[in-house]
């Protein structure tokens, strides 16, 4: 199989960890007989330096004409003083808008080798392997908002949480299809006892569930879901929810695994369109240039790309298995425990690539 991959390495630790992800992809390509052609693009701080804006049309054109975008984290203190309209983060927002990535997938898998790195007790965290699917382009973050003064002079502010049935249906379908490929369990999270938007969400979720009879479907209120993620996270396979609830729940879920350096994410559009794969964490300026960043989040992002955009399941699993094997004996500083050998970013990438 031949695929063209746009690579936006990003800022600070971005290029360091991306180098290792590319190395692992090359190893997969040679083992399984594929060809991955990388096209480097500038987005974020690197783009401000190159073009004066966080996302230039020329780069977007390259991204849109490729099969997927492997992305690093962007931003950092170097660009703290640039004008608000050209801040690095604007690059990501413009990218999401242009690619219409309405579904954000954040997997949380607790590798048994890292169980003691989690802030949660071993017996609770054991076996956790879940994905939060968050609706990314609708809901309260995109609704009408207003700050004003009422007749008595009191200041007030409103934000509108609006979803239409099509927006709900398409994210539910992404989540059900994902559950079908995994452990066939889907929990839809809402606040149906209070919000009309959640009543509609639940109605459509139930309707879509009828098309996926092989998936065990349940609903949960968001307050309970927040509690269950800490009390019994292993009960979940796929969780699907709206933009704001997903924002909060996916951050809560992300700490289960122990380190930000282990967490990947995917932002998907309609089938067949370019999807974006990136670590959940930021550009970690505090450790950049020291060779100690954990490249696994970036490598797992590449593995998600193989599985979701290219349907290369065996190849994606080969990456995960290699990571599991290497973690038994070697760790970067963020996940280091005694009895293992501490390695640099580059050494970790070499080991994972070698074990494919
Ligand atoms: P951060 O996620 O970069 O760092 C938080 C902590 O986690 C730091 O101590 C860092 O060293 C550690 N960390 C993160 N990734 C790691 C890795 N791979 N290996 C080892 N340790 C790792 O968050 P921050 O410091 O708040 O943000 C830094 C910059 O990143 C900011 O400019 C922020 O805007 C940006 N950011 C970008 C994205 C993105 O590109 N999607 C997301 C979040 C933050």
Image: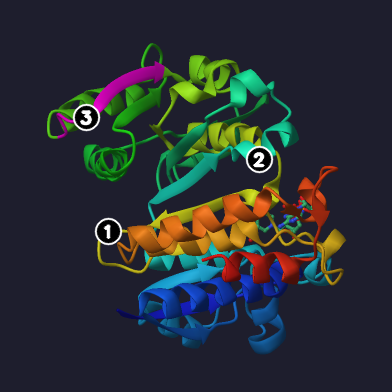
Q: Nearer the viewer, mark 3 or mark 2?
A: 2
Q: Which mark is residue 54?
A: none
Assign a secondary structure to mark 1: loop
Q: Residues within 10 Å of mark 2 (few under 14, many from 20)?
A: few
> Is residue 348 within the magenta segment?
no
Tell me the magenta residue range. Answer: 212-220
Residue 93 percent coordinates (x, y): 53, 61
- Looking at the image, residue 213 lies above or below residue 274: above
Mark 2 lies within 8 Å of ligand 1 (Cβ measured): no
Residue 27's spot in the image, x, y percent? 51, 76
Residue drawn 70% across and 74% down? Answer: 45
Q: In the rendered image, which residue does mark 1 sit on?
A: 270
- Picture coordinates of residue 94, whole percent (x, y): 50, 66
Q: Which numbered disc flags the more N-terminal residue, 1 or 3? A: 3
Q: Secondary structure at mark 3?
A: helix
Between 323 and 218, which is closer to the camera in this rendering?
Answer: 323
Which residue is disc 3 drawn over?
A: 204
| Residue 73 location, quadrant | bottom right
Left or right of 299 on screen, residue 35: left
């Amino acid at each position: 199989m031949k695929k063209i991959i746009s690579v936006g390495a990003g800022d600070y630790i971005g290029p360091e960890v991306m180098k290792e992800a590319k190395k692992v992809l090359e190893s997969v390509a040679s083992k399984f007989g594929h060809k991955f052609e990388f096209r480097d693009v500038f987005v974020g701080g690197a783009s401000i330096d190159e073009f004066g804006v966080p996302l230039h049309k020329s780069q977007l054109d390259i991204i849109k004409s490729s099969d997927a975008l492997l992305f690093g984290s962007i931003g950092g203190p170097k660009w703290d003083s640039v004008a608000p309209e050209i801040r690095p983060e604007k690059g990501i927002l413009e990218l999401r808008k242009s690619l219409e990535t309405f579904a954000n997938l954040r997997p949380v898998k607790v590798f048994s080798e890292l169980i003691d790195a989690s802030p949660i007790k071993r017996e609770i965290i054991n076996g956790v392997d879940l994905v939060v699917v968050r609706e990314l382009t609708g809901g309260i973050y995109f609704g009408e908002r207003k700050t004003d003064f009422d007749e008595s002079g009191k200041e007030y502010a409103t934000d509108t949480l609006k979803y239409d049935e099509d927006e709900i249906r398409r994210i539910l379908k992404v989540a059900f299809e994902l559950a079908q490929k995994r452990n066939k369990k889907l929990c839809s999270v809402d606040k149906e006892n209070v919000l009309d938007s959640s009543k509609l969400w639940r109605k459509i979720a139930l309707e879509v569930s009828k098309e996926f009879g092989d998936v065990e479907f349940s609903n949960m209120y968001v307050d309970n879901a927040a509690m269950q993620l800490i009390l019994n996270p292993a009960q979940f396979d796929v969780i699907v929810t709206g933009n704001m609830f997903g924002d909060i729940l996916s951050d809560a879920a992300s700490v289960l695994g122990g380190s930000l350096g282990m967490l990947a994410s995917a932002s998907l559009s309609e089938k067949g369109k370019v999807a974006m794969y990136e670590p959940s964490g930021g550009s970690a300026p505090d450790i950049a240039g020291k060779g100690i960043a954990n490249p696994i989040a970036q490598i797992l992002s590449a593995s998600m790309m193989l599985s979701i955009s290219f349907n290369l399941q065996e190849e994606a699993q080969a990456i995960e298995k290699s990571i599991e094997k290497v973690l038994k004996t070697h760790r970067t500083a963020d996940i280091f425990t005694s009895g293992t050998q501490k390695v640099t970013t580059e050494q970790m990438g070499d080991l994972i690539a070698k074990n494919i």
